[in-house]
Amino acid sequence: MKRTIALSFLVALVGAATWFVMRGPNAAPPSAITVDRSPARIERGKYIYEVLSSCEDCHTERNWKKFAAPVLTSLSGGGQVFPKELGLPGQIAPPNITQDPEHGLGKWTDGEIIRAVREGVSRDGRALFPMMPYQSFAKMSDEDVQSLVAYLRTVPSINKAVPKTKVDFPVSIFMKSAPQPVTTVVAAPDKSNQLEYGKYLVEMSGCEMCHSRKERGEVVSGMNFAGGEVFRVGEFEVVSANISADPETGIGNWTEQRFIDKFKGYANFTNENLPPAVQVNFTVMPWLGLRNLHEDELKAIFAYLKTMKPVRNKVESHPLVASRL
């Protein structure tokens, strides 16, 4: 009798483990929507793609030999494989999102694209690696996500195959829990409410993801916006800045104008006059896109960040430089 019970328990345990490993993400069917591609939507979608959400920066090969790693515009949306030095759990490759029918989104429906952006589920039902910030994009308004789709439909086809993302175990298993269906209407933020608008913009820009130190893919408790995340590409290394409201190690003592000037200070850079990337100026911050944020947006972002919990965390942005002095 005891052996029977033990055997039954073992079978149940093996079955549960097998289900946990083999299960798919929590996914709802894509909507049957056909997005209206008005000029206004396409223009707004281009702004989201190039500036607000920096889609182009992840889904395009970049020139890491120049400051801020400008995208290779002729390959916009063609996908890339992230450098191994970033320390990601496996081969992470943002895919081709041009209109190419073989390697891109040409055969995807509008609903399938929206589901991937906001829910993290690919056309074939796979969970997307959450470096794609779909957990934030779940809060992208219906109008904005439809505008993004409208613009993506205009991105010229690039017949380019990108290797599939291969996530290491056990992250490959646990990340299946990340996608969650968006089941409600997502309204646009009230722009007259500066803090609400700022929160929306911060989420759409993915500020917290880069400016928070993480362990095993999760933000270290209490370190939100406090910087300290290390990024390495090639021989260079940079540590993300503390943008919490701490007055000594964050932006607590910054003025609104100083914050705006930080972004607009890159306004005159072009691909032709960009300085070469060296350790002292190396950055993964997409300054070349974010410099084009509208001033009212920067003011709202700053106002919202100033409400974040101050976290004392002194960051040396270029520690390798400091170690050589």
Image (cartoon, rainbow, N blue to C red):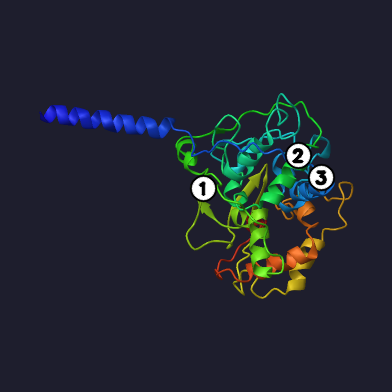
Q: Which mark is residue 217?
A: 1
Report which residue position mark 3 lands on.
38
Q: Secondary structure at mark 2?
A: helix
| Side of 85 relative to 255 (left or right) | left
- Residue type marked 2: Leu
Quarter containing the N terminus: top left
Report which residue position mark 2 lands on.
152
Q: Secondary structure at mark 1?
A: loop
- Report if the CB atoms under discs 1 and 2 are less than 8 Å apart: no
- Residue type marked 3: Ser
Residue 159: x %, y % from top left? 77, 26
Residue 24: x %, y % from top left? 48, 33
Q: Where 238 falls versus 56 (above or below)?
A: below
Q: Residues within 10 Å of mark 2 (few under 14, many from 20)?
A: many
Q: Earlier in the sequence, mark 2 or mark 3?
A: 3
- Residue type marked 1: Gly
